[in-house]
Amino acid sequence: MRVLPTLQKQRHPLASGASQRRRLAELPLARSFEASLEAAGLFPLTATGIEVLQVNVGRKCNQTCRHCHVDAGPDRTESMSAEVADACLRVLAATTIPTLDITGGAPELHPEFRRLVTTAAALGRRVIDRCNLTITRLPNYRWIPPFLAEHRVEVTASLPYYQPRQTDRQRGDGVFEESIAALRELNALGYGRPGSGLVLNLVTNPVGAFLPPDQQAAERDWKRELERRHGIVFDRLFTLTNMPISRFLQHLEEKGQAGEYLARLAARFNPAAAAGVMCRTTLSVGWDGSLYDCDFNQMLDLPLGDGIPRSILDFDPARLERRTIALGPHCFGCTAGAGSSCGGAVA
Amino acid sequence: MDDNHYYHAPDLARFAEVGRGAPELWDKFLAWYSAVFKEGALSAREKALIALAVSHAVQCPYCIDAYTTAALEQGSNEEQMTEAVHVAAAIRGGASLVHGVQMRNHLERLGM
């Protein structure tokens, strides 16, 4: 499998969140994101509650996908401590937040992954594992599929396309073949099969600088093609827009398309999508316990607004549930067309 | 701007300026155009592929850019898009070749 050095390893100018925010701010836009929200009657954008606690346990990953907004890879070392993981679980136990969404990097690489899953599952919470699929094929991680099935974890797996060429172009040579093998194993455990209660959703990001297809139409195509070609079944397809952050921003910069792409996202601003953006119902936790409005803000080091607790150690639902969301030009990525969220299209 | 040529990529974004001379006709065109590309008996993806093929047949560079993007955004892949272009090319090629019958007719009329 092809693995590249991360931006951090390369000491790339876009490795830091602050430098990415500066670059995005330089790109010309006909109208700011804030002004677009204002015109839609949505400014300031506020949270409506916390339905998902999304915990990013670290940036280590066995892959280096070219669109990755985390700049994850094997050379990353940021990793959540047991104390911070404890704090996340305490928050779950003390609240009625229904969903724990575990992401990374490849979250299964983290030593606390199993404890997070088992504890949250024992609390009766819906647990989502954002799985890159290939991790389950590594010799030391063959335990993952049966473990997920045992704890009824919802698997949200990345697969950009139902053909190898596009998938490998985005995620690395050989990723498609390994991903198909992983999906077959999940299917064999009951994942994606009607009546099993084991949910297998797929996530697709465009392999390039264009918006994702209509989610329902794409899901029909994908179900037909994955079953016909590989005998694979799954529940839902989530179409996600590539965010002009980190490695995808670097890719756009290399091709001289960053301004064009951001302008395209802005031109497709959809008020209905803006009303349903995931940050309104999600709280994102970083590996060091810092709180963010979403995983994208986390990677841009864009903190919560002033006067709001900024660490999971200071969790205060009263001040977090109705907080004002921190915004930037990248937010156009979640509001373009049918919208984009960790659960796919929103409008 | 260097305007010493006929096709200029940024002009695509200025398409709506064509409406200035006849706004009512433009509005009618736009309403019809939007309706044509909506999901119907054909899917939006199929329509974008047809549009891509026609763009090549009429050799409109603006349309080729627009419908390459649209085809991708409707979920088509490079193989499908390339086959669509071949369909357009085959019809163009066939359209030339079928005129060979007319040539033959004329040959036969003039010949002995």
Image (cartoon, rainbow, N blue to C red):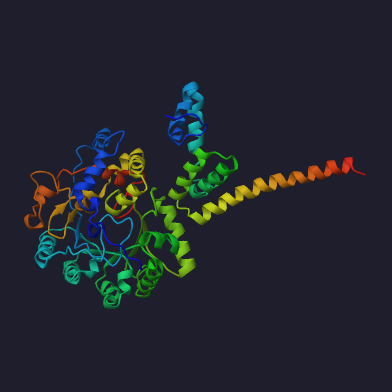
Q: Please tell me which residue lies in front, A2 or A33.
A: A2
Considering every residue shown, the one lying at the far right of the view is: B112
Q: Please tell me which residue lies in front, A54 or A318.
A: A54
The quarter in which the N terminus of chain A is drawn is bottom left
The correct choice, above or below, for A124 with respect to A70 in the image is below
Q: Is residue B79 left or right of residue A252?
A: right
Q: Is residue A104 left or right of residue A161?
A: left
Q: Is residue A138 visible?
A: yes
For image coordinates 50% across by 36% down, the residue present is B33
Q: Is residue A241 visible?
A: no
Q: Where's residue A171, x and y in %? A: 36, 62
Q: Where's residue B80, x and y in %? A: 52, 55
Q: Please tell me which residue lies in front, A248 or B23.
A: A248
For image coordinates 21% across by 63% down, the residue present is A76
Tally of numbered discs: 0
Q: Where's residue A90, x and y in %? A: 10, 63
For image coordinates 79% across by 42% down, the residue present is B102
Q: Where's residue A306, x and y in %? A: 10, 43
Q: Please tell me which residue lies in front, A160 or A13.
A: A13
Q: Is residue A256 left or right of residue A109?
A: right
